[in-house]
Image (tube, grey):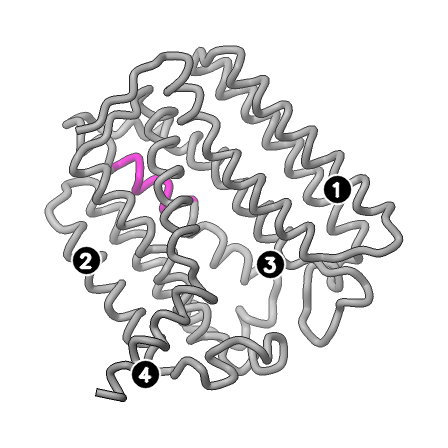
Amino acid sequence: MNSIISFVRRIQLYFTVMYPWFNALLLSTVMVMSVKAIYLNDIQLSEHVYFAIFSVFLAFLLLRTYDELKDTEVDKIAFPNRPLVTGLIHYKDVKLINLTAFILLIIINLNKEAATSFFLLFLSFTVLSWQWWLFPKTVSNSFFLTFITHQPLVFLLLLYIMAMHSFDKNLPIYIEKAVVIAFVYWLPFIIWEIARKIRAPEQEDRYLSYSKRWGLERALAVIKFLTLVDFMLIITIWYWLDMPWIFLLLYLLLTVALVVYLWRFSRKRNKDGNHVKLAGEIYLILYYFIPWLVKGTVHNSVSFL
């Protein structure tokens, strides 16, 4: 009995510290619903939409656990206080969570026609990324190779989401439209990825953060540049899909807010890299929330099934 209680507590700790389940579920829901709003101009809930939300939740969990299983030795140096490193969570616990997520993802996404194909593409890419594409020393020691073998995972996940929406409505996959939307909504994750790995000079340690690799000012400049590029792409989406003006206005306000914040942050004397990480997280959530918000308020067509 004590071993069962101890196991449950370790799992609870993991979903509190390393994978806060509510935050992950919120992001998964906002992603699926906003992508549907952009892709099909619809935010109607259905059985397959719920499946898509849960699949995205499990996909992020799979990525989180693979990352920990892959970087155990690195984390001992860079993140010595993480539960897996300190022993508060066991290695076998993370493997069990990983295996459970993997099996559930396969069960949920069987017999979903083209959506299953996109899911398998994402899953294959994920497994290969976990294995450093079978060349661990070559890939792990190259920033460029690591980027191109890991970052496209979100792009593929977005394509899967749109394939699920097409399957739900018994529609063909509008591939050109899906690729453009996936690319535009992939960029905020890249911005967040850089933002969460920025530290103030006095916070730097042996971990190779983006601010240590490029320098703080250059790392902040990269985020600003990508934010502005993404807004230019949003203008394209707005014009191409004939979105209302409020859609463009909200993205403009969000872009200005992040760029101004980063500009002010760079001029602070006492900097805390965690503030940039938080700003990136807020930007990501709001970026995805806007299409759902605009569709629900401007068109007033929310339907719960």
Separation (CA) of disc 4 from disc 1: 43 Å
Q: Is residue 35 left or right of residue 231?
A: left
Residue, disc 4: 6
Image mark for residue 144: 3
| Label located before the other in sequence (1 or 2) | 2
Residue at horizontal 71 percent and vertical 45 percent from the top: 222
Q: Which residues are magenta?
A: 155-163
**Residue picked out by circle 1:** 262
Q: Position of residue 139 (x, y in %)?
A: 53, 69
Measured in 3D between alpha carbons, the distance from the residue under mark 1 to the one under mark 2, in whole angstroms, is 41 Å
Dot 3 or dot 2: first in sequence order is 2
Element type at mark 3: helix
Q: Amino acid at mark 3?
A: Phe
Q: Is residue 299 above or below residue 279?
A: above
Q: Earlier in the sequence, mark 4 or mark 3?
A: 4
State the CA–CA distance, disc 1 to disc 3: 25 Å
Residue kind at label 4, given as amino acid type: Ser
Relative to 8, say whether 48 is above or below: above
Could you tell me residue 28's position as x and y percent?
A: 37, 45
Q: Which residue is mark 2?
A: 106
> Rounded to the nearest whole Å, what is the CA distance between mark 3 and mark 2?
31 Å
Compare marks 1 and 3 and give the one earlier in the sequence: 3
Q: Which mark is residue 139?
A: none
Q: Give the secondary structure at mark 1.
A: helix
The answer to whether residue 160 is left or right of residue 19 is left
Label 4, label 3: how far apart the Cα atoms are: 41 Å
Label 2 crowd bin: few (<14), some (14–19), many (20+), radius 10 Å: some
Disc 4 versus disc 1: nearer the observer: 4
Secondary structure predominantly adopted by residues drawn in magenta: helix
> Which of the two labelled residues, at mark 4 and mark 2, occupies the earlier sequence position?
4
Using a 10 Å C-alpha cutoff, classify the residue at mark 3 as few (fewer than 14 neighbours), some (14 to 19) or many (20 or more). few
Q: Is residue 234 above or below residue 167?
A: above
